Amino acid sequence: MGNATVEVSGAQAARWAAELRSALIGAIGPDDSVSPVQVQRSAEMVIAVIGLVFSGVEVAKTIAEWWSARRREGVAVTVLLPDGTRIELAEGSQARLEIAMRQEGTEPH
């Protein structure tokens, strides 16, 4: 099992994170989990955070596909892994995200 934190930022971060959370709930396995959305506000931006426990790369595909469908709306998504890996989604980043999440999901903790 791996874990990750997903940060969603942009003008409608909380709403977008709720949408992403719903998509993730539909994609996870029976032993996986998705935390409720937590909103962090600063003077400059709002970041909505979702915690994940996962056992496969399906969550990476779900995150990348969800972001790809909404990126023109100004949503930014960053995935943080426990080893310090930080992946900011951009065009062509799905493969990198899948590799990182596959490694996180198979490494013993």
Image (cartoon, rainbow, N blue to C red):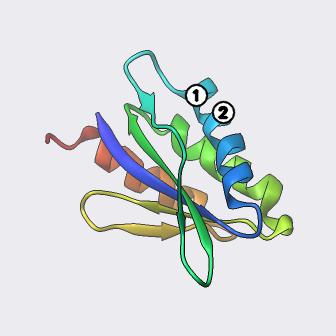
Q: Is residue 66 toward the left or the right of residue 5 in the image?
A: right
User: In the figure, 78 relative to 50: above or below?
Assistant: below
Find out whether the residues at labels 2 and 1 contact each other: C-beta distance under 8 Å: yes
**In x, y percent, where is residue 62?**
63, 41
Asked which secondary structure carries label 2, the reply is helix
Q: Is residue 95 toward the left or the right of residue 10 in the image?
A: left
Write down the residue under mark 2.
22
Which amino acid type is marked by label 2? Ser
Figure quadrant of residue 47: bottom right
User: In the figure, 84 relative to 105: above or below?
Assistant: below
Q: Which mark is residue 104?
A: none
Residue that lies at the very extreme toward the left in this rendered image: 109
**In x, y percent, where is residue 54?**
39, 34
Figure quadrant of residue 9: bottom right
Quadrant containing the C terminus is top left
Q: Which mark is residue 25?
A: 1
User: In the figure, 91 relative to 105: above or below?
Assistant: below
Figure quadrant of residue 92: bottom right
Residue found 81% across the figure and 57% down from its top: 70
For disc 1, the neighbor class at 10 Å (few under 14, some 14 to 19, many from 20) is: some
Asked which secondary structure carries label 1, the reply is helix
Q: Is residue 61 toward the left or the right of residue 57 in the image?
A: right
Residue found 85% across the figure and 67% down from its top: 72
